[in-house]
Image: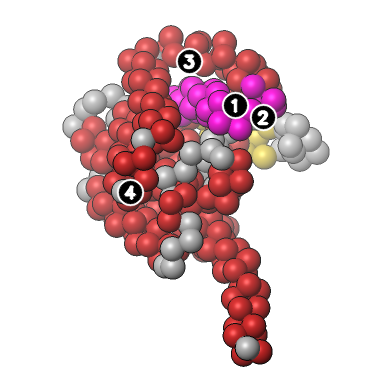
Amino acid sequence: MFGYVTVNEPELRIREYHLYRSYYCGMCMDLKDQYGQSGRMTLSYDTVFLALLLTSLYEPAETQRSVRCVVHPLEKHPTRQNAFTRYAADMNIILSYYSCVDDWNDEKEMKKKLMANVLRGKCEAAGRLYPEKAKLIKEKLDQLHELENQSRTDAASSGSPSLLLDEAGGIFGDLMAEIFDYQHDTWGPALRQVGYYLGKFIYILDAYDDLEKDRASGSFNPLAAMHEKPGLDDYVQGLLTMTISSCTAAFETLPIVENIDILRNILYSGIWCKFDQKRMKRAQETAPSSVSRERTAQDE
């Protein structure tokens, strides 16, 4: 899983942060209850956001507890669980399984294959609860995998990386749209828009985040053809800005009152944290070589 859709912790009030953590820990407990200790190892911030969004919109009955766990063995901590933390846990398992399969196919990491084997039965169990969503998730990931494989051998695709990035991001956006549209009701269209553009954002950011690693391993990355072009960071930031703007526009149409400040913190600030970190790292890595070239030019 990706883990990009998280809070900007320093910008949250203490009460809000503890409330957010209670949903995070609640989903962790749902994963343990339904899928065992190995299930909770897959917990992702992205699906915690899904649980918090749906909870804030539909305001279901909740179970609040104080528990100890492996991560917090000495001190009890609050958890909140409801129908949407359980739903998000089910989607988390399905996405995590296919993520491990994809990583194994791309990078041949044995730990990913082992984890996929552990999650296979759990994914099938979650799929039986939501057969239509599980079917669409697999279809979209197969479609994405086919596009990525085709791009490796299709010379024409290398000439239009922006179009490839948009097409691939759109496929992952369709997948996320289906996950966010929990019950196809009045709010379904807006939730689909939130999920679609958030999915595109995640896909673009993941391609940017993994660019150097994918180039080193030979794995597919739609930004690979642009890696030496000047202004890549600004180009990606522009794409991400346009994409998340469409996401937040749809989000603001939803009649959400509960947890609104936490959700806005995530969508307007937290989601940029990984991009900012990566951009700073790239700048630090390229700065020495730039200085070296300038000194060489001066010496000549």
Q: Which residue matches tag 4?
A: 159
**Mark 1 highlights which residue?**
104
Q: CA distance from mark 1 to mark 3?
A: 21 Å
Q: Disc number at residue 20?
A: none
In the rendered image, which quarter contains the C terminus?
Answer: bottom right
Secondary element under disc 4, as helix, strand or loop, is helix
Does residue 98 show up magenta in the picture?
yes
Sequence-first tag of 1 and 3: 1
What's under tag 4, amino acid-wise?
Gly
Magenta extent: 86-113
In percent of width and height, residue 105 lies at: 56, 26
**Front of the two marks 4 and 1:** 4
Q: Which residue is mark 3?
A: 126
Mark in the foreground, 1 or 3: 1
Q: Nearer the viewer, residue 127 or 220?
A: 220
- Eye-nearest disc, 4 or 3: 4
Horizontal and vertical percent position of residue 9 = 56, 58
